[in-house]
Amino acid sequence: MGGGLAGMVAGIALQQAGKNTAIVSTGQNALHFFSGSFESLHAPSERLAELFSAAGIRVHYRDGVRLMPLGTFKDAALSLDDIDLFPSPKFGKRVLIVNFLGYHDFFSSFIAEGLEKQGMECRIRFLNLQELDKTKAHGEMRSVQIARSMDRIWEKVAQEIRLLLKDEDTVILPQVFGLSDTTVPGRIRQAIPARVVFVGTMPPSVPGIRTQMLLRKRYQLLGGTFLMGDEAIRAHEHEGVVHSIATQNLDAHYLEADNFILATGGLFSKGLRSNPFQIKEPILNLDIDCPEDRNNWYNPSFAGEQPYMGYGVKTDAQLHAVKDGIALKNVYAIGSILGNTRPELGSGAGLAIGSAFAAVDQILRCTQNDNEEPATPVILSEAKNL
């Protein structure tokens, strides 16, 4: 349940282990806001590196900083190949910042201000591309709409930038390249006689959507069933075991399985929901690790860290989800729905990946211990009273 980074990694790992799985995904998830760097991961494990490589996701790592959309810098290590990592915030002397006329989700002036604070000289220029006129006329100048054109006209963009260059050693571009062709960012770097740095834009994230597309393609090539645009709405549970779930689109059919993985996200992704009186997990009604007093949910300082962003479902040591104080035997919670309840697994993308592998290992270990024959966990059957 959930087709974000955690759900996709778990699904791929289980398919590789010979299990049959289905992923129920509403469509949009935190990958649409992905910065391109994997928080709390400094280097990929061999297992993760192999999974990413097989999916066509290229990564690199070094301890350093990355340039943020507002001109600030943030510590980073493991990142997608087209996301630059620098030893220090001052990575050049003279910088040309290039945007596209009519595109307002890339903050050139903020980036210039941030770089000038680091001692770099900046010049901002805009490209007026006829290929974007139709997109502009329809009011669709968002990152994904632009990216659909950029993979076709990247050579023209590179040529225009070469004409704009004076004595700059660095060119900064919005990261709207490589949505369908992952080689485009590298080709642009080769075509421009200066260092090219791609900087994130307002969501949706082109690197994030590309990552999700590649993971989904790999998952389906392994035989996984991806139920796009659907949503798990309730579960049928008896004596600590979940037998099936109902989804929004399957009407009179349930999804039956030996094991279920809950990867629906936290409050941001609506994996948790709230009202003035409680925070609730809507599918299984799991126990939530949060104070009862609502006054403790938030920090009165708007700029301060908000406690509610760290709330998550309760689990046991094996990531079994807990309901009414009892661990469900075949339900595992992974990813941001855990909140800060399992700090040993990391945060952000690190939490998603670490908890996904932990749940997969637990499922495979239990299967091996029970000496079970390979099963077909996902079955569509007529709805019945359970």
Image: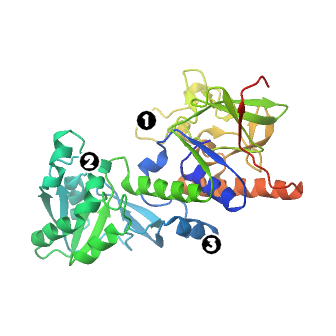
Q: Are marks 1 and 2 in contact (CB under 8 Å)?
A: no
Q: Secondary structure at mark 2?
A: loop
Q: Nearer the viewer, residue 251 or 335?
A: 251
Which label sits on residue 301?
1
Q: Residues within 10 Å of mark 1 (few under 14, many from 20)?
A: few
Residue at (36, 58) in percent of width and height: 179
Quarter of the image that includes the N terminus = top right
In this orientation, does residue 173 appear?
A: yes
- Count residues near mark 2 (Cα–Cα under 10 Å), then give few for <14, some for 14-19, many for 20+: some
Tell whether 65 sits left or right of 107: right
Q: Inspect the image, locate mark 2, and give the three-letter code of the amino acid beneath it.
A: Asp
Residue 256 shows which numbered tag?
Answer: none
Q: Is residue 383 left or right of residue 143?
A: right
Q: CA distance from mark 3 to mark 1?
A: 42 Å
273 above or below 191?
Answer: above
Mark toward the start of the polypeptide (3 vs 1): 3
Report x, y in % for residue 339: 60, 44
Distance from label 1 to label 2 (Cα)?
27 Å
Location of the C terminus (image quadrant): top right
> What's the amino acid at mark 3?
Glu
Question: Between marks 2 and 3, how big is the CA–CA gap?
Answer: 36 Å
Q: Which residue is mark 2?
A: 105
Crowdedness of circle 3 by 10 Å Cα count: few (<14), some, many (20+)?
Answer: few
Mark 3 = which residue? Answer: 46
Which corner quadrant of the image does residue 329 belong to?
top right
